Image (tube, rainbow, N blue to C red):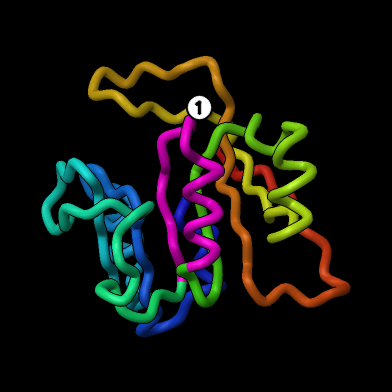
Amino acid sequence: CVETLRNRISFGTHVFDSCAGDGVFGDALLAMGVGVRLSEIDIEPLGHSVVRDDFLVGDPARWGNVDWVVGNPPYLHAEVFVRRAWEVADSGVAFLLRLGFLAGQGRSRALYPTIGVPDLYVLPRRPSFTPDGKTDAADYAWFVWPKHRKSNELPLLEILSP
């Protein structure tokens, strides 16, 4: 998933995982070897370098200058996470979300006209979020909202390789 950010980040880019859990995204970003500066927070951290903080109400001044906000927010609060991430990030937002997040009257009226339609990287296989490897019935995509999209540039749709 995080490979979709490779052409959007450069050495020293501050990537902020807003709901890091056990640090899976952070590990994947660091493994890409592009020299990102990584910060990870969660209200209930499970990982190695994750700081206990609440992204939705925490003070962004403590986090420093954030280029990209990434993560896999709780679906029930995903829209709130997207809005908050849009406020915090200088370069963009990238979240793993159910594909169904694209639909919805509220988002089509209030969210997408405000921050734009995301680039979508559809996952051909359903990811597992449990130790037993089981999946739920939802399809997922990596939703990427670049902050500095050119006015004539259309959102990207890509189906990732299995």
Nearer to the camera, 34 or 15 = 15
Question: Helix, strand or loop at disc 1?
Answer: loop
Nearer to the camera, 120 or 46 = 46
Q: Which contiguous range is marked in magenta?
A: 68-87
In the displayed orientation, state which residue is furthest to the right. 152
Residue 123 location, quadrant: top right
Q: At 34% across and 70% down in the image, what residue appears?
A: 60
Residue 109 location, quadrant: top right
The residue at which mark 1 appears reads as: 126
Nearer to the camera, 27 or 64 = 64
Position in image of residue 57 (x %, y %): 34, 55
Residue 155 location, quadrant: bottom right
Q: At 45% across and 81% down in the image, what residue appears?
A: 10
Q: Is residue 87 left or right of residue 29?
A: right
* Image height of 12 relative to 91, above or below: below
Q: At 46% across and 17% down in the image, what residue appears?
A: 136
Q: Disc 1 residue type?
A: Arg
| Residue 123 magenta-highlighted | no
Most common SS among magenta residues: helix
In the rendered image, the quadrant that contains the C terminus is top right
In the displayed orientation, state which residue is furthest to the left. 48
